[in-house]
DNA sequence: TTGCAGGGGTCAA
DNA sequence: TTGACCCCTGCA
């Protein structure tokens, strides 16, 4: 059958999508936007999102999603993998100079996932002053103690816990997850979301600046975490999350001097406009994989 | 083996 | 504007 421009087939609890362009699993899952996907030796990726566990195989323009029904594909994965977006168009638009052409060429096949905003929020609170392998471990541990278990292919996966699950817990209880000083932020932020002090569902319809300010009401959420939350949930794309890495990269590639966080963000959002978030992701991945900006 | 610096930020002083 | 912060890793 055809679904929104793709040839889709269902067989053996799997979905095969033909005609998928610009989707490289490694580049997408290793570019720092997500923490719950892991690569297998055959190049496939397994992961959990939206309460489902799946395994993905990409061969040419053919995407195979194991453990997936047609309904799940339509209701969950189509949007999650941003399959409604034409990335060749997007790439043309952000290839504004030689630097971006290089970055985009290098990171070809990166897609910005439209992840669950609640999971992204908590994951990026954990990311503060932390490293990716650690963040992955902490998110996995929190899911294991508070999330629902999902069996797939003889393995047990764990869904990311819901708002109530975390809000009903305590900093002491989740301390075994090794989130350290971030434990209290996680619990307090969860309670505020549960109480409706911050309504995550409304952020998408708000002005980007307002949405960011709203998120910054939550403990453990500053400018950077707020921008990541907005970007990686697909709520707003005119943000340019600027951490020390992105700062160094921008200083080296664009400024040729030291620049402040504020200066870099303002320049980037002005220069890349509504697609700033995509530009950030390609630049960040390019720089990190090539060790650009390392002193 | 042991010890120490520092990490994709945020908060409080 | 600056240091502390949990905990882990890398490296003397």
Image (cartoon, coloured by chain):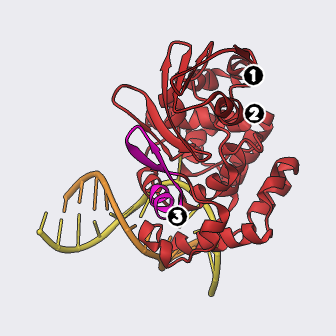
Chain colours: A red, B yellow, C orange
Queried whether the magenta region covers residue A83, the answer comes back as: no
> CB atoms at circles 2 and 1 under 8 Å apart?
yes
Q: Residues within 10 Å of mark 2 (few under 14, many from 20)?
A: many
The quadrant where residue A257 appears: top right
- Residue A156: say if magenta: yes
- Residue A93 is tagged as 1
Q: Residue at x 50, y 46 (%)?
A: A36
Q: Are marks 3 and 2 on the same chain?
A: yes
Secondary structure state at the residue bearing disc 3: helix
Mark 3 Cα within 10 Å, few/some/many (few <14, many 20+)? some
Marker disc for residue A275: 2
Closer-to-camera residue (B8/A247):
B8
| Secondary structure beneath label 1 | helix
Q: Disc 3 and disc 1: Cα gap in Å? A: 42 Å
Nearer to the camera, A151 or A266: A151
Which sits in the foreground, A162 or A193? A162
Disc number lying in front (3 or 2): 3
Query: Which residue sits at x=84%, y=54%?
Result: A202
Quarter where residue A233 is shown? top right
**Residue A287 in the image, given as x and y percentages of width and height:** 51, 35
What secondary structure is marked by label 2?
helix
Chain under callout 2 = A
In the shown orientation, is residue B8 left or right of residue A227?
A: left
Query: Residue A216, position in %: x, y?
Result: 74, 64
Label whose residue precedes the other's in the sequence (3 or 2): 3
Tag in front: 3 or 1:
3
Distance between the alpha carbons at the discs numbered 3 and 2: 36 Å
In which chain is the residue bearing label 3?
Answer: A
The region drawn magenta spans A138-158
Give the residue number, with chain letter if any, for mark 3. A146
Question: Residue A245: x percent and y percent?
Answer: 53, 47
């Amino acid at each position: 059958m055809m679904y929104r421009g793709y040839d889709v087939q269902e067989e053996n609890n799997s979905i095969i999508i033909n005609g998928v362009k610009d989707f490289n699993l490694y580049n997408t899952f290793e570019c720092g936007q997500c923490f719950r996907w892991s690569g297998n030796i055959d190049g496939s990726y397994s992961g959990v999102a939206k309460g489902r566990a799946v395994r993905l195989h990409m061969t040419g323009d053919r995407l195979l999603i194991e453990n997936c029904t047609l309904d799940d594909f339509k209701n969950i994965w189509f949007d999650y993998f941003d399959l409604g977006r034409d990335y060749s168009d997007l790439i043309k638009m952000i290839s504004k100079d030689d630097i971006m052409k290089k970055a985009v060429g290098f990171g070809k096949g990166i897609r910005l996932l439209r992840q669950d905003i609640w999971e992204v929020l908590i994951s990026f609170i954990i990311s503060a002053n932390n490293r990716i392998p650690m963040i992955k471990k902490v998110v996995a541990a929190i899911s294991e103690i508070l999330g629902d278990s999902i069996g797939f292919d003889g393995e047990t996966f764990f869904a990311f816990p819901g708002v109530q699950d975390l809000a009903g817990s305590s900093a002491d209880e989740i301390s075994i997850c090794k989130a350290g000083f971030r434990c209290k932020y996680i619990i307090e932020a969860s309670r505020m979301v549960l109480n409706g002090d911050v309504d995550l569902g409304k952020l998408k319809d708000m002005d980007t600046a307002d949405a960011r300010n709203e998120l910054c009401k939550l403990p453990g959420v500053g400018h950077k975490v707020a921008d990541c939350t907005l970007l990686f949930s697909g709520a707003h794309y005119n943000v340019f999350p600027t951490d020390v890495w992105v700062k160094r990269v921008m200083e080296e590639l664009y400024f040729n001097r030291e620049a402040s966080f504020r200066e870099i963000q303002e320049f980037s959002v002005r220069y890349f406009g509504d697609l700033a978030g995509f530009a950030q992701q390609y630049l960040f991945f390019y720089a990190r994989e090539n060790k650009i900006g390392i002193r």
